[in-house]
Amino acid sequence: MRQLSQLLASARSQGQCIALVPTMGNLHQGHIRLVTVAREQADVVVTSIYVNPIQFGENEDFDNYPRSLDKDLQMLRDAGCDYAFVPDDDEMYPQPPLTQVTVPQIAKGYCSADRPNHFSGVCQAVARLFNMVQPQLALFGEKDFQQLQIVRRLVQDLAFPVRVLGVPTVREADGLAMSSRNNYLNQTERAIAPNLYQVLCDTAAQLQKSGNLDAAENTLAQAREHLKSLGFQVEYLELAEQESLQPAQVKSQKLVLLTAARLGETRLIDNISLEIA
Ligand code: AMP
């Protein structure tokens, strides 16, 4: 860490903008897009790679989470990233944290319904990384929409001197959102997986066409059933207000349709933004 601080100190003293891209590694083109946008917007790009144990639930895939450091480092070099920051557990959590960082209102439900400590684990790691790297810019993917809105609010509430930039989801040619967990899909599941985004697109189009929020729950119920008939176990598929993630109530708000669904053992998430005028 001291080494990174020293390397960044000279950039900082020259007034250069430092960008941070926090990741858990096993990089794909979605992560690389964040690095590319960071490269365009900042003078120095730091990508952190840390599989954060405290954001995983008890029965989740922490032990099996794919780790591919050598390949990741090569991809970062190719993308023009200046520094990879790869802290170990002692560096990230020299002692078990007693401080909690949470944004309970936005962290409620959706991706935390089945794993209540997930987002406080994310916030803990993000807050520490912000203090360790002290970036002026931090990039997060819209794919993890709830996470992005939580981090935005965390930064506002605690006055972190960081600009948070959300980057649109990078997809495979068939629409599947890129994810480190896509590697878990077998061939049959991989063929079904793009339907998740397709159903989101169709449902968003239907909601926009009807323009009637009162009928939205019915449309969402049909979409959930459709996903089930395709072989997904739907954790949630909901329409929410973008910033607060409270259930959508008023027309003309910026809304987001969010979903998480399992195919076999693999948990996929996706979302699409929309406005109902
Ligand atoms: P992860 O390594 O899964 O923690 O992701 C690190 C960052 O990359 C997060 O800000 C994610 O939202 C972002 N990310 C992951 N997949 C994608 C994608 N397909 N498109 C854009 N950003 C992504």
Image: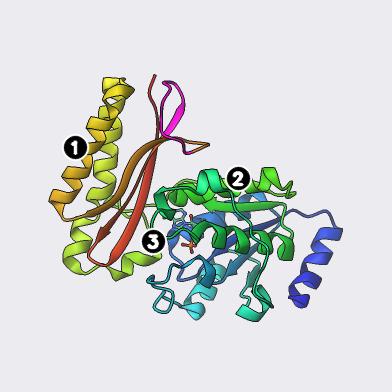
The answer for how far apart the CA atoms under marks 1 and 3 are is 26 Å
> In the rendering, which numbered label is found on residue 152?
2
34 or 60: which is nearer to us? 60
Q: Residue at x 60, y 67 (%)?
A: 48
Q: Is residue 103 above or below residue 273?
A: below
Give the camera-side residue of 263 and 80: 263
In the picture of the structure, the residue carrying the numbered disc 1 is: 222
What's drawn in magenta, residue-wise? Answer: 245-255
Give x and y (percent) for residue 88.
Answer: 61, 79
Name the quadrant containing residue 258.
top left
What is the CA distance from the residue labelled 1 to the residue labelled 2? 32 Å
The reply to whether callout 1 and callout 3 are in contact (CB within 8 Å) is no
Give amino acid for label 3. Ser
Q: Measure how far apart labels 2 and 3 are at the Cα level.
A: 22 Å
Q: Nearer the viewer, mark 1 or mark 3?
A: 1
Q: Residue at the location (20% across, 63% down)? A: 189
Q: Is residue 71 magenta?
A: no
Does label 1 or label 3 sit earlier along the sequence? 3
Three-letter amino acid code at the position of disc 2: Arg
Tell me which secondary structure the magenta stretch mostly adopts: loop
Tag count: 3
Q: Secondary structure at mark 3?
A: loop
